Amino acid sequence: MLPITNFILLSAVIFSIGAVGVFFKRNIITILLCIELMLNAANLAFVAFASYFGDSTGQLFVFIVMTVAAAEAAVGLGLVIAIFRNRETLNVDEANILKL
Amino acid sequence: MTVEGTGLAVFVSTAVPSAVDLLAEVRDLAMPEIIVSVFACLALLVAAGAGPRHQRLAGWASLGGTALGLVSVVSIWIAQGRTLPRIGLAGMYVVDEFALLFKGIAVVAAAVTIAISMRFLTEERTERGEYYALVLFATVGMMLVPSGADLLSLFIALELMSLSVYVLVGYLRGDGRSNEAAMKYFLLGAFSSGVLLYGMSLVYGVAGSTRLVDLAVALPQAISANGDLVLLVGVGVALLVAGLAFKVAAAPFHVWAPDAYEGAPTPVTAFMSVGVKAASFALLVRILVDGLGPLRAAVESGWPGWDLSVGVLAAVAMTWGNLAALTQKNAKRLLAYSAVAHSGYALLGVVAGNRMGYTGLVLYIVVYVAMNFGAFAVLIALRRGTIAGDGIEDFRGLAARAPGMAALMTVFMLGLGGIPPTAGFVGKFYLFAALVETGDRWLVALAALALVNTAISAYYYLLFVKAMYADADEAGAPALATSPGLLAVVVVSGVLTLAVGVYPQPVIAVSGAAAERLEPAPGPKPTRNSAERAAPGGRAR
């Protein structure tokens, strides 16, 4: 069996890719995907620790997070559609009615 | 077939009683949440069934639900006060005075939001029943957050609240500003949830449990037993603190707040700045004080402690919020920066970490509810017909047109500025005094910085007063868009702001009871000062 550190390092890498992507990607849908990466990095860490401890709480957490992520995607895509109807663009840099 | 039948019978005979027990436990612990959830579903049904002209029925149903929810919260406090705290649902759910007070704040915030929304939605010509249902669903989340005794239940409650509020911010579908505010709030909110969640996973990886009580025991043990774990716990706690700072909008993690507050429909802005903020602080207190309390201060094994980072957050939030508010022209945006500053003040209670600090934190949030809702209610009355009514110039000449409204708005501004004899002064006094009481010179310096900030903030709060009393009236401006509910909110908030300022003892007693079970920071501070003197340059607090 692989040592636990491998899983944690992999999850840290995935989390970092997601977090960096949120700041550097300009398309709303790509940003949403990056946020999903962050959530799934946490999921990977949870299952790795759950298996390490032989404890089911971490696995339970993963199911809850997956459900929440699905709900989040539903709300996020709803907002994307509302914005696209008004603006015809999904670039966050063009969302500038409210000054930054 | 018979074997399967017996298996099913065994399953039914064990599962049904345990399900019944579980439901009984839910009923005992979470009656207010059940009531509000039922009424939220009812509001949705009414919205679907009633015609377009009768959507307000859903609003009245929701208002009834919040009233019953409040009755339920108060009756639990009165009837079961001696048996608190009650922990149940496999240790995930706790009902204590702190949780009950914040549940009360959540239902009151929902009721006030609904009361000030009805006329506003008519003016916007978008009164749809699901608005009220969403407010109630967000309220259920806000009521569950302060009862969370486990990272899992805290996360679910937080997301239930946040997802409902994202939709509310974008409620004005055809309005580009509302869309944009919702998008920014959603993206940064989801991002901060991811940060918070990753922090939770790392902390779970060290402690082997997600119960807050277990974290408080296991984390310090793990650090002292194995120095290598300091890095893992450090990253986890740093992510948790950053995620919480996002949620309470403490600078520099506040970038979403001004845009979200400005673009959202004004009643939703009021709801966010009061209800969501109170629930976020409950989340912060649960995680930092209940779960990570023993990690507050630095220890020899190399653990740096989280008190320094929270102290810096408080200082930056106060200063940044107040300085940025000085130059704002839009009243909602100004109040957003003022809310950032108020987050900084409230964090002082956590930084002080003594009995007085926690009492001050709870007290501050309670009085902030009254002052902020009053101010937003006045702002909503200015939104009428073709007038957006959210600039400071819209307040010009209000004293001549609506003297009562202007006088009460003055009270709210003095209260937010912390000027006696208003409730805001009492709240700030408690927080600043708690810092001084610790005797730590850095914390006393922080209190001094907070005082300077209070002086700065008086400038922009008095801008409203100047506009109302000194500037000339606009000729031919239409009458204010008031409604009985909105007037009641303004008057009650004004009376409370003044009454608590003059006679604060009852509110202090309730806040003290709510804060009583929060563990104070251990160890007398003087020991720490002497340790610092013994090792100069070791750790600059």
Image (cartoon, rainbow, N blue to C red):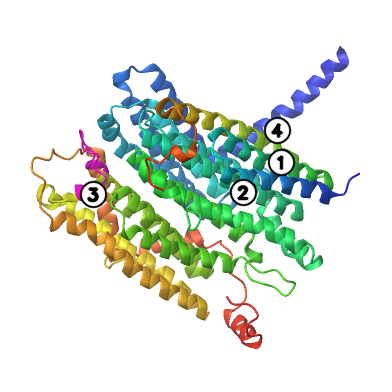
Left or right: B218 as drawn, with respect to B520: right
Return the x and y of residue B536 as percentages of the image width and height: 63, 85
Q: Residue furthest bottom?
A: B534
**Chain under callout 2:** B
Q: Amino acid at mark 1?
A: Asn
Q: Quadrant of the N terminus of chain B?
A: top right
Q: Nearer the viewer, mark 1 or mark 4?
A: 1
Q: Is residue B319 above or below residue B398?
A: below
Callout 3–callout 4 Cβ contact below 8 Å: no
Q: Is residue B188 magenta?
A: no
Q: Amino acid at mark 4?
A: Ser
Q: Which residue is mark 1?
A: A43
Q: Amino acid at mark 2?
A: Val
Q: Which residue is mark 2?
A: B195
Left or right: B32 as drawn, with respect to B217: left
**What residue is at 26 percent from the left and 42 percent from the top?**
B380
Same subunit, tags 3 and 4: yes
Q: Secondary structure at mark 2?
A: helix
Residue interval drawn in magenta = B380-394
Precedes in sequence: disc 2 or disc 4 = 4
Left or right: A3 as drawn, with respect to B91: right
Q: Secondary structure at mark 3?
A: helix
Q: Which residue is mark 3?
A: B491
Q: Amino acid at mark 3?
A: Val
**What residue is at 52 percent from the left and 31 percent from the top?**
A75
Residue B442 seen from this side: yes
Callout 1–callout 4 Cβ contact below 8 Å: no
Q: Which sits in the foreground, B387 or B357?
A: B387
**Chain under callout 1:** A
